[in-house]
Image (spheres, rainbow, N blue to C red):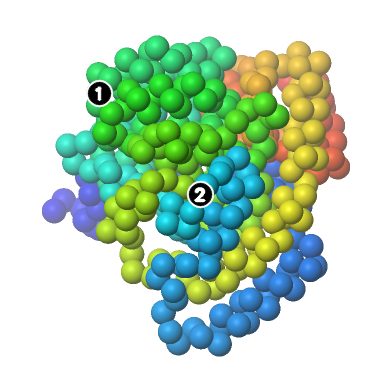
C-alpha cells in the first residue's frame, strides 16, 4: 500500500459529487421545487411521523407496503395505467434506485450505455458498481439520433441503458418511438427511462409509463424530489415488471427505507394534488424563461423540465460568478459554454433576469 487511506485506485483524488451549497437569496441550482408544502401538508406529515416515532424501537416494514400502494395509485394518475404495488420499488432518492439497478444488472464484465451530455451521476454509479461505462452522443440540438443509438446498443449489448426523459441538463424529452426502439434493440438488457422531471413535460409528450405493458425490460424511475416538492425526504421509486423488483430485493440493504421516510412519503402522497399544485405555474414560468432568453439572443435548449440550459458563453464561469455576486445561484454544468437555471417563483425569475441583464452588460 503506497498511501493512506487504502482507497480503490480509481477513486484516488476524486472530488465527491455535489453542487455548491451557498447561502444566497435566490437558489436556482439544483432543480428543486421552490414552493414549500402547505401548513395542512406539514401538519399531516408531522402527525404521521409522530405515529411512526412511537414504533422506532422496531425495524420498519421491509416491504413498505402502504407506500408502494400509494405510489402505484399515484402513477396511475400520472401517465401510467394498470400499475400494481408489486410493480413498484422505492429507495432513498432515485439516485439510490439507480445505484440498486446497476448493482443488480451491471457489474464486472457488463456495461451500461447512455448518451451525453446527460446526468453526471450515471458514470459514478457505473464506476462504483464496476460496470463498464459506454457513452453515445446526442445530436447538436441534444435530441437522440435514433439510428446511431440503436447501432450502439446492438453493438455493445449493454445490460443497462440509461435514458433520462426529460434529460438533465438539457431538458430534452424522448419520443415514445425512441423508447420502443431501444427496448427492442436492448434484447435481454434493461432500459431505464429516468423520469425524475416527468411531471414537468409539455402537453403532448407522453410518459414512458404507457409502454410498460409492451416491454418487460422497461424500467421507469420517478422521484418525489422535484415536482412533488419533497427533496428533503429522499424518496425515489420505479415501476417495472415485478421480476425486476424481485431482482433489486437481492441487492438492497435490509430495512433501507426508514419508518420516518415511509410515513413522510405516504402522508405527502395523500396531499399529491396540492404538492403538485404549482407544476402548471412552473411550466408556464419555464416557457416564459425560454422565450425571454431567446429574445435576448441566447441559444436555448427546448425544455420539458423545470430547468433551462442556455448559452453560449466564451467564459461561462465569469457569468455564473457575476450572477452569484447579485445573489442568484445557478449551475455551471453541461457542455462547455452553457449554463443551467432551475425554474423558481415569478419573483426569483425576475431577480434572475435582472441580474443576467446587468452581468451581460459588464461582460461585453
Ligand atoms: N435523475 C436525474 C436526471 C436527476 O437530475 C436527479 C437529481 N438531480 C436524480 C435522478 C436524483 O434525484 P433524487 O435522488 O433526489 O431522487
- Residue drawn at the location 58% of the way across and 20% of the way down: 337
305 left or right, relative to 182: right
**Residue that lies at the very extreme toward the front in this rendered image:** 82
Q: Residue beneath label 2, please? A: 83
Q: Relative to the observer, which residue lies in front, 217 or 36?
A: 217
- Is 322 placed above or below 138 here? below
- Quarter of the image that includes the C terminus: top right
Q: Relative to the observer, which residue lies in front, 85 or 14?
A: 85
User: Dot 1 lies on which element?
Assistant: helix
- Residue drawn at the location 28% of the way across and 29% of the way down: 187
- Residue drawn at the location 74% of the way across and 24% of the way down: 290
Question: What x and y, as percent, mark residue 104?
Answer: 28, 49
What is the distance, in whole Å, between disc 1 and disc 2 at their CAs? 31 Å
Q: Residue beneath label 1, please? A: 156
Q: Relative to the observer, which residue lies in front, 313 or 256?
A: 256
Return the disc, 1 or 2, that comes first in the chain's sequence: 2
Q: Quadrant of residue 192?
A: top left
Label 1: how many Cα within 10 Å (few below 14, some 14–19, many 20+): some
Label 2: how many Cα within 10 Å (few below 14, some 14–19, many 20+): many
User: Dot 2 lies on which element?
Assistant: loop
**Residue that lies at the very extreme toward the left in this rendered image:** 1
Question: What x and y, as percent, mark residue 166?
Answer: 57, 32
Question: What x and y, as percent, mark residue 206?
Answer: 60, 31
- Is 61 placed above or below 346 here? below
363 left or right, relative to 172: right
Amino acid at each position: 500500500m503506497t498511501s493512506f487511506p487504502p482507497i480503490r485506485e480509481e477513486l484516488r483524488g476524486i472530488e465527491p459529487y455535489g453542487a455548491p451549497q451557498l447561502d444566497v437569496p435566490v437558489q436556482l441550482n439544483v432543480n428543486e421545487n421552490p414552493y414549500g408544502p402547505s401548513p395542512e401538508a406539514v401538519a399531516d406529515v408531522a402527525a404521521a411521523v409522530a405515529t411512526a416515532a412511537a414504533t422506532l424501537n422496531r425495524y420498519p416494514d421491509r416491504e413498505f407496503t402502504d407506500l408502494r400502494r400509494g405510489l402505484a395509485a399515484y402513477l396511475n394518475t400520472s401517465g401510467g395505467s394498470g400499475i400494481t404495488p408489486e410493480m413498484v420499488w422505492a429507495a432513498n432518492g432515485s439516485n439510490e434506485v439507480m445505484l440498486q439497478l446497476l448493482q443488480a444488472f451491471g457489474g464486472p464484465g457488463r456495461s451500461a450505455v447512455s448518451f451525453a451530455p446527460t446526468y453526471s451521476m450515471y458514470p459514478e454509479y457505473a464506476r462504483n458498481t464496476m460496470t463498464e461505462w459506454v457513452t453515445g452522443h446526442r445530436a447538436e440540438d441534444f435530441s437522440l439520433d435514433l439510428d446511431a443509438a440503436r447501432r450502439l446498443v446492438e453493438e455493445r449489448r449493454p445490460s443497462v441503458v440509461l435514458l433520462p426523459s426529460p434529460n438533465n441538463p438539457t431538458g430534452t424529452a424522448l419520443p415514445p418511438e425512441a423508447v420502443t426502439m431501444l427496448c427492442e434493440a436492448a434484447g435481454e438488457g434493461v432500459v431505464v427511462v429516468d423520469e425524475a422531471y416527468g411531471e414537468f413535460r409539455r402537453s403532448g409528450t407522453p410518459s414512458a409509463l404507457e409502454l410498460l405493458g409492451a416491454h418487460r425490460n422497461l424500467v421507469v424511475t420517478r422521484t418525489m424530489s422535484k415536482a412533488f416538492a419533497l427533496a428533503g425526504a429522499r424518496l425515489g421509486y420505479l415501476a417495472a415488471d415485478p421480476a425486476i423488483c424481485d431482482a433489486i430485493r437481492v441487492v438492497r440493504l435490509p430495512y433501507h427505507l426508514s419508518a420516518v421516510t415511509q410515513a413522510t412519503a405516504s402522508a405527502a402522497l395523500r396531499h399529491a394534488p396540492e404538492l403538485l399544485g404549482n407544476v402548471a405555474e412552473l411550466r408556464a414560468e419555464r416557457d416564459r424563461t425560454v422565450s425571454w432568453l431567446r429574445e435576448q439572443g441566447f441559444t436555448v435548449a427546448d425544455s420539458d423540465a423545470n430547468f433551462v440550459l442556455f448559452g453560449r458563453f466564451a467564459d461561462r464561469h465569469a457569468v455564473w460568478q457575476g450572477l452569484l455576486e447579485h445573489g442568484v445561484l445557478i449551475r455551471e454544468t453541461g457542455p462547455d459554454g452553457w449554463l443551467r437555471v432551475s425554474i423558481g417563483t415569478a419573483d426569483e425569475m425576475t431577480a434572475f433576469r435582472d441580474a443576467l441583464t446587468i452581468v451581460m452588460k459588464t461582460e461585453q
